[in-house]
Amino acid sequence: MPEEDRNGRLILVGAPLGNPGDASQRMRDALAAADVVAAEDTRRLGRLARDLDITVAGRIVSYFEGNEERRTPELVEALREGALVALVTDGGMPSVSDPGYRLVRAALDAGLPVTAAPGPSAVTTALALSGLPTDRFCFEGFLPRAPGARRSRLAALAGEERTQVFFEAPHRLTAMLADLAAAFGADRPAAVCRELTKTYEEVLRRPLGALAEWAAAGEPKGEITVVVAGAPPASATRPPDEALRTEVADLEAAGSSRRDAIAMVAERYGVRRREVYAIVHGPGQ
């Protein structure tokens, strides 16, 4: 028998974000037929199977951030032995800010077939609901957790003209929105999409400054996706030196380091960083 006929297959299974009614027939078939189901959370998989009234007859193993490195070789070996391995995460497509990329890469490197049973995606669902332009967008996933690294990343993104989609944990949302407002401008249109497809789904469409105030006034909970409008095309008119100096000072007052504030202002107006630096550190400063 040819080697390729003896190998199994890895199938990435797109799971509902919250509403079991969004499960596809291919997802049901894949979970029911798999020899091995690798699940980010085995208890959630059990609840989903009950909601869908399907029986997962294959061996169920956990596959999450903490054990990916150890478990990947085991799953690749199962594929070599001819198993159909289904990979499912808590919601959406595996490997999109979820466990899965390591296994996909390992399977491909081993010459093993990989396919997908596509399902819902928080990225495109939030984008469509945001009311912001959808013709061109970029997905940034989770920003760095450390404040300095997060602000530096946002400084680099401030001039991006495509709509941007982010994921964020609820306990970091307030700080994230404050940094977004400082980096992109408080008036930049945005949307916070919370608990998509679930009972308490909520989509707030407001400028970044207003969203930062909303988050600071409460304790947002649940799965959160943030969508932010792209930067307007760079103006051909360079602002006066005093205006650039003032914007840097305002960003510093909001918590940014001077280095990050200079980078944000330079990006926003298409001015070289060293030029803004010279203005900020000019005579009398």
Image (tube, rainbow, N blue to C red):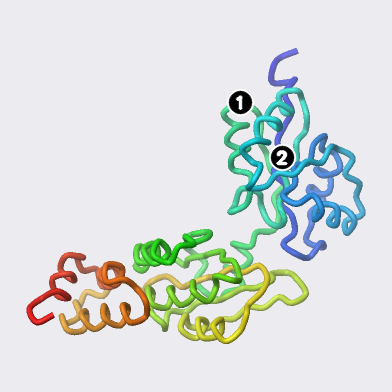
Residue drawn at x 59%, y 62% is: 123
Residue drawn at x 52%, y 82% is: 211
The C terminus: image quadrant: bottom left
Looking at the rendered structure, the secondary structure element under dot 1 is loop
Q: Is residue 76 above or below residue 225?
A: above
Q: Is residue 267 above or below residue 8?
A: below
The N terminus: image quadrant: top right
Q: Disc 2 marks which residue?
A: 11
Q: Is residue 65 above or below residue 161?
A: above
The answer to whether 108 appears left or right of 263 in the picture is: right
User: Does the image show residue 124?
Assistant: yes
Name the residue nearer the viewer: 262 or 257.
257
The answer to whether 239 appears left or right of 75 in the picture is: left
Q: Hey, which residue is sitting farthest left in the picture?
A: 283
Residue 200: horizontal and vertical position, in percent?
Answer: 74, 77
Q: Residues within 10 Å of mark 2 (few under 14, many from 20)?
A: many
The answer to whether 101 appears left or right of 11 in the picture is: left
Residue drawn at x 37%, y 80% is: 254
User: Does the image show residue 160?
Assistant: no
Name the residue nearer the viewer: 216 or 13.
216
Numbered circle sitting on residue 61: none
Q: Residues within 10 Å of mark 1 (few under 14, many from 20)?
A: few
Q: Quadrant of residue 110?
A: top right
Number of marks drawn? 2
Q: Give the Cα separation between the discs numbered 1 and 2.
A: 14 Å
Q: Disc 1 marks which residue?
A: 111
- Badge 1 amino acid: Gly
Residue 22: horizontal and vertical position, in percent?
Answer: 78, 61
Name the residue nearer the viewer: 181 or 174.
174
Q: Quadrant of residue 204?
A: bottom right
- Badge 2 amino acid: Ile
Name the residue nearer the viewer: 206 or 38.
38
